[in-house]
Image: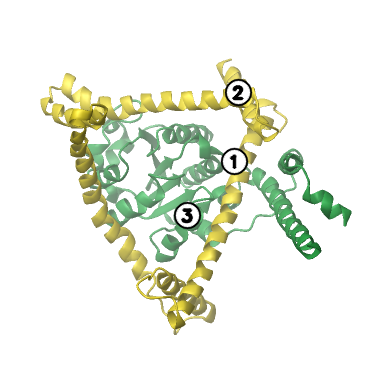
Amino acid sequence: MKVFERLSRLDRRVIFLLVALAVIVPMVVPLNLPVDITKPVKRVYEMVESLPEGSVVLISTDYDPGSEAELYPATEAFIEHCFRRNLKIYLMGLWPAGSELGNIALNKIAQVYNKKYGEDFINIGYRPGGAVMLLSLGRNFGDVVKVDYQGIPVDSFPLGRKVKSAHDLALVMTFSAGDPGILHWIIYFHARYGVPICGATTAIMAPQQYPYLSSGQLVGLLGGLKGAAEYETLVNKRGRGLRGMDSQSIVHLLLVGFIALGNVILLYQRRRR
Amino acid sequence: MINIIGTWIAALLTLAIYSFLYKDNPFYKLAENIFVGVSAGYWAVVLWFDYAWPNLFEPLFKRGQWYNIFPIFIGLLMFAPLIPRISWMVRIPLTFTMGVAMAVSITQIVQGDIFPQLQATFLPLKGIPFFEAFSNFLIICGVISTLVYFYFSKEHKGALGLGAKIGIWFMMISFGASFGYTVMARVSLFIGRVYFLLHNWLGVI
């Protein structure tokens, strides 16, 4: 078969081009493919829904611009859900650029819902130290968090006076791209202080979190862009997550096609030998 | 204005990086070197302003916390290997770091990881819906057979060999799931860049 011979010598740049087209075309011409809601994502949504108004949620944006594509859409969707439910938000980051990225999302959504800094949300910025920081944070929140990201004493804000220890937090939501991240929150914060933990991770990290979901140490999980798209569906917000899922689905189909075709060609070549 | 310039620089650097897919070229090399340089500079600033200055030097110089000299001295010993005569002194900060890391992590890992995970494998097989029982059975089987695979004190023959083989199957399925997620992650990153180019730079979508 001449076609198989030709395909086996195909320049890989043709594949790159096809993948690029599979991403670009659905983005320009949206297909609006349906997104199924999985149990771990639904659990995050239900957890937020179950919190009484005025509860404090600690959001930790533990990622950097390298993972922004996967985690930023989830950050926006989650913050929007919290503000709709009139929850108070403490934002921080275990990664230096994380709190900055979280701050962009927080200020953007706060404007839409007329939320005030210091009353409805506070950004306490980058908190270095990983495990040691989390252990101290749980024990003496007030002593560790004295100023916000601009150096203003948190005690000067009504929300700042509300949280003195881990027990004043109703939920921790970590957007995690690695170390320190979700595992540290589970092992060093949840295990010692009992605060429920939800997470959003990059797709690469998602499979490692399933044992913690089944053990109940993690309440719910948004895995990668797919998790963000599911959460956007639940909160009825068409953001970057849903927009990217059309491209993601088409590329996956293309890749499955390439894998099947590659195997067929390999079998054909083996038989000929 | 500054945003427009920033967007253009980011867009051109993105295209320069992707140009490597065609073939290696000077634009790619330029973008790569800029990335390495900017990362090093960024981390130098973070380490100084978020770690060294607020924790060591600011308390020492501004609040008279004189005993901060000791951690500074111990930290400087990290550079001891540069002077062969005193290179052995690097063991002091290394031992200290390892000791603290062990002390912080051992108790918490046992309490927060090993025990709860072990507990999560004690699952009921009776008195629950069939599919739940089957799922629990798979978890128990997966844990035991994978542990059997990593038992090396006896040759993997007979029942032990069968257990190890089942363990390999469980691990292979797990690696497959991880690989699938990895592909999804890489495609997501590409989608993020394409979105940036089409939305922020060109304004097409």
Instruction: Name the tint of chain B in the rendering.
Output: yellow
Residue placed under numbered mark 3 in the picture? A49
Check chain identity for marks 2 and 1: say if they share one.
yes
Q: Residue at x 28, y 48 (%)?
A: A166
Three-letter code, disc 1: Leu
Circle on res. B7: 2
In which quadrant will I find the N terminus of chain A? Answer: bottom right
Q: Name the one closer to the observer, B79 or B5.
A: B79
Label 3 and label 1: CA atoms lie apart by 30 Å
Residue B68: % across, % down: 15, 28
Q: Residues within 10 Å of mark 2 (few under 14, many from 20)?
A: some
Residue B182 falls left or right of residue A101: right
Nearer-N-terminus badge (2/1): 2
Q: Chain of mark 2?
A: B
Check chain identity for marks 3 and 1: say if they share one.
no
Label 2 and label 1: CA atoms lie apart by 18 Å
Residue placed under numbered mark 1 in the picture? B189
Circle on res. A132: none
Query: Looking at the image, can residue A99 be seen?
Result: yes
Q: How is the image coloured?
A: by chain
Q: Name the one closer to the observer, B205 or B186.
A: B186
Q: In the rendered structure, are the residues bearing label 3 and label 2 in contact, judged by CB atoms less than 8 Å apart?
A: no
Q: Residues within 10 Å of mark 1 (few under 14, many from 20)?
A: some
Q: Residue at x 83, y 49 (%)?
A: A6
Residue B101 falls left or right of residue A103: left
* Number of numbered callouts drawn: 3
User: Outermost residue, right direction?
Assistant: A2
Three-letter code, disc 3: Glu
